Image (cartoon, grey):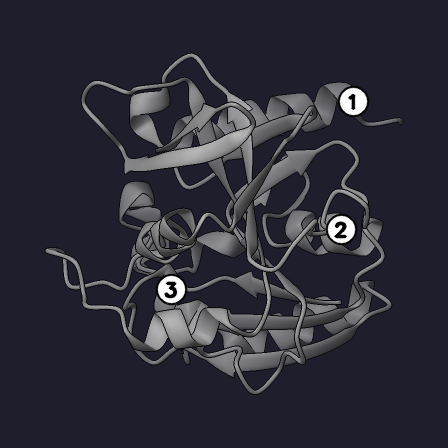
Amino acid sequence: MKGVILAGGKGTRLRPTTRVVNKHVIPIYDRPMIYYPVETLLGAGIDDILVISNADHIGKYIELLEEDFDADFNYKVQSEPKGIAHGVGLAENFVNDEFVVLLGDNILIGDLTREMLSLDSPGAKIFVKQVDEPAAYGVATIDDGKVTRLDEKPDDPPSDYAVLGLYRYTSDVFDIIDDLEPSDRGEYEITDVNKAYVERGQLEYEVFDGEWFDAGTPEGIYKASKVVRDNRQF
């Protein structure tokens, strides 16, 4: 199984800092943000990893990651920030069949095993966690052990299961991405990809028991850094 880390985007929620640096090098306590998704994949036994970022920063990731990790890294430029699904589509020539996508600003603290990443049948898998403010995230409605609905940042969330920036796909996802239309904000949305699997009855889910932080906001960086520090063995 291969891993894909998406480390591009505009970083608008972290302006003005991200006017001059890519958000994925902003520290979470004492290490760059991108180290955490790399460690999550390595912890699950995935050491063949594609990092996707913009042209201005991809060279720095090569310099940064090759020094500190024993993994087989590959790199791809996303020339325009056209959304998460667009970024996933850039991995088509990298993956064979099964692969995992992890957003570079999602900090997962806890065990992620290869068994958790498995699929019971053809399709895809999302990872969810119950949160206090689901309206800030994509939300999954789960009924009788199945994902029946996905909503992106709904005003009135139908459930408290937030969808993490961690996805498990097989190569059939690229056919879905090819058929996508851009959203109102001009991006190709990963929620639309996952909705296609819901319509097919092929979207599985896994509840993540560890801690999860969206480090794409100042508050998320603060909370993740505090937990990392409190759990670090000095």
Quadrant for the C terminus in the image = top right
Q: Which residue is mark 3?
A: 85
The crowd level at tag 3 (other Cα within 10 Å; few <14, some 14-19, many 20+) is many
221 is higher (above) or lower (below) than 50: above
Q: CA distance from mark 3 to mark 1?
A: 33 Å
Callout 2 touching callout 1 (CB < 8 Å)? no
| Foreground of the two, 4 or 114 | 114
Q: Residue at x 60, y 39 (%)?
A: 107
Residue type at mark 2? Glu
Callout 3 touching callout 1 (CB < 8 Å)? no
Instruction: State the image coordinates of residue 8 (x, y, percent, origin top left).
Output: 42, 64
Q: Is residue 71 left or right of residue 25?
A: right
The crowd level at tag 1 (other Cα within 10 Å; few <14, some 14-19, many 20+) is few
Q: Residue furthest bottom?
A: 93
The crowd level at tag 2 (other Cα within 10 Å; few <14, some 14-19, many 20+) is some
Q: CA distance from mark 2 to mark 1?
A: 15 Å
Q: Which one is in front in this view, the residue at disc 2 or the one at disc 1?
A: 2
Residue 56, by quadrant, is: bottom left
Instruction: State the image coordinates of residue 51 (x, y, percent, origin top left).
Output: 58, 70
Q: Which residue is mark 2?
A: 39
| Foreground of the two, 144 or 45 | 144
Q: Which residue is mark 1?
A: 231
